[in-house]
């Protein structure tokens, strides 16, 4: 007997990296469980975009469920009266199940990243009318306020400015920022405009302006010079969870209890944030030593102090006043980030990671990691590894 397979219409904007990665997560789920037959947009070189023809094709196809980017035909999508999961452009739909980024976590991650690098002057670039941008801005600013810091904001308003005029306006804004300044942009596309603007007004990236975006669109981020750092939204895992939720909805006839709110994965560091905003040369020396050695060696606080001209008391005091952390905590942060990277982006075993990072045995690395993150290394890998097949419950 042939197992039941559901007909799922997937209407995503594959011109954007985020949607392509969501689609990869959906199709990866189906490779494992073979529960879906898919309906996609026609390629525009075969059939130009025509919403009326699309709805007609979709009606004839009789989908069992729909996963769609927000579109002009939302009423028509909802009229199919089948399980519908929406990935909105503007704001969540209260009467639908939404796929939505954890924008609070994204803003907090950006703030934490810049604060840990020692920046005292910060900026934010976003969109005036988009809920997701507003949520990122609010979380970024609130996190900075907890550290007694402030961010200058530039908001793109499509009613007042054209997209083509954005670079010249950003150039004027950026010139007025105190330097060095770290700028968090709500999307990678905004940072492309800021990079162009910075060149025109002779601002150095990253020494005067450090740039961090969101989406980790590798094509955009890697083609720029300097290359652009970005927050990976974990879109592959988002697609996997949406596909898993859609299958459960169809099998049980019960919709998910809440929207799919997906936390970000990590900051993908490139050249645009490769500098440190630290005036004190002894702290810069200590941070440079930690960054170079802590990912691979089990260094001690004494090792860090030895490369500076300070006593432990003075250096600890400076770390606390200028970085709001301790030397030991900074070592731990660098090592934990390295473990996270190896767990999510490599196939090394826990034993191999422990060896690579100079832990005496895997039990030590497990305790170390759980104390810092609340996860065991295997739990973290299950949740965050790219291409991981394991469902999340």
Image (cartoon, rainbow, N blue to C red):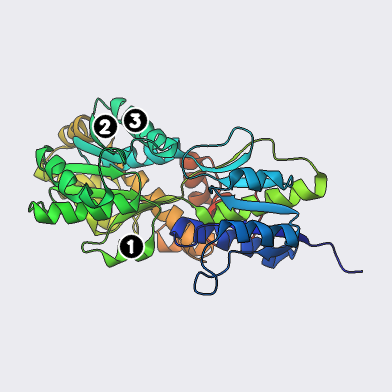
Residue at the location (52% across, 44% down)?
88
Rate crowding at label 2 as few (under 14), some (14 to 19) or many (20 or more) other CA atoms within 10 Å: some
According to the image, label 2 marks what residue? 324
Q: Position of residue 158 (x, y in %)?
A: 31, 41
Q: How far apart are marks 1 and 2 (CA)?
A: 34 Å
Q: Distance between the residues labelled 1 and 3?
A: 28 Å
Is 311 or 269 nearer to us in this picture?
269
Which mark is first along the chain, 2 or 3? 3
Which mark is first along the chain, 2 or 1? 1
According to the image, label 3 marks what residue? 143
Residue 73 in sight here: yes
Which of the image's four quarters has the N terminus? bottom right
Q: Residue 220 carries which label?
A: 1
Rate crowding at label 3 as few (under 14), some (14 to 19) or many (20 or more) other CA atoms within 10 Å: many
Q: Position of residue 72 (x, y in %)?
A: 53, 47
Rate crowding at label 1 as few (under 14), some (14 to 19) or many (20 or more) other CA atoms within 10 Å: some
Q: Where is residue 327 in the image (x, y as percent from the top left)?
A: 27, 40
Q: Residue 14 carries which label?
A: none
Left or right: where 392 falls relative to 22? right
**Considering the numbered disc 1 on the image, is that residue within a helix, a strand or a loop?**
helix
* Name of the residue lying farthest toward the right: 1
Residue at the location (18% across, 56% down)?
196
């Amino acid at each position: 007997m042939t197992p039941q397979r559901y007909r799922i219409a997937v209407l995503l904007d594959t011109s954007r990296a985020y949607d392509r990665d969501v689609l990869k997560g959906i199709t990866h789920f189906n490779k494992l469980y073979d529960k879906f037959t898919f309906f996609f947009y026609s390629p525009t070189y075969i059939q130009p975009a025509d919403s009326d023809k699309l709805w007609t094709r979709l009606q004839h196809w009789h989908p069992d469920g729909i996963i769609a980017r927000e579109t002009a035909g939302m009423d028509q999508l909802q009229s199919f009266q089948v399980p519908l999961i929406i990935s909105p452009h503007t704001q969540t739909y209260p009467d639908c199940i939404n796929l939505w980024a954890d924008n609070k976590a994204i803003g907090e991650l950006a703030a934490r990243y810049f604060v840990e690098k020692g920046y005292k002057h910060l900026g934010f670039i976003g969109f005036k009318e988009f809920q997701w941008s507003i949520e990122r801005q609010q979380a970024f600013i609130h996190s900075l306020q907890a550290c007694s810091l402030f961010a200058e904001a530039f908001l793109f308003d499509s009613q007042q400015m054209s997209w083509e005029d954005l670079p010249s306006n950003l150039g004027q804004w950026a010139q007025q920022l105190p330097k060095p300044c770290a700028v968090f942009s709500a999307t990678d596309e905004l940072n492309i405009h800021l990079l162009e603007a910075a060149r025109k007004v002779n601002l150095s990236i990253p020494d005067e302006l450090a740039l961090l975006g969101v989406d980790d669109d590798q094509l955009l981020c890697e083609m720029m010079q300097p290359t652009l750092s970005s927050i990976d939204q974990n879109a592959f895992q988002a697609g996997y969870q949406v596909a898993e939720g859609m299958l459960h909805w169809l099998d049980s006839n019960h919709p998910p209890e809440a929207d799919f709110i997906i936390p970000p994965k990590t900051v993908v560091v490139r050249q645009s944030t490769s500098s440190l905003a630290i005036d004190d040369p002894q702290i810069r020396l200590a941070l440079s030593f930690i960054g170079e050695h802590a990912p691979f060696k089990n260094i001690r606080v004494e090792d860090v102090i030895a490369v500076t001209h300070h006593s432990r008391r003075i250096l600890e005091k400076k770390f606390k006043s200028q970085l709001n952390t301790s030397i030991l905590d900074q070592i731990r942060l660098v090592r934990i980030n390295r473990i996270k990277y190896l767990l999510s982006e490599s196939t090394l075993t826990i034993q191999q990671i422990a060896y690579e990072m100079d832990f005496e045995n895997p039990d030590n690395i497990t305790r170390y990691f759980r104390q810092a993150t609340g996860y065991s290394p295997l739990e973290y890998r299950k949740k965050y590894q790219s291409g991981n097949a394991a469902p999340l419950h």
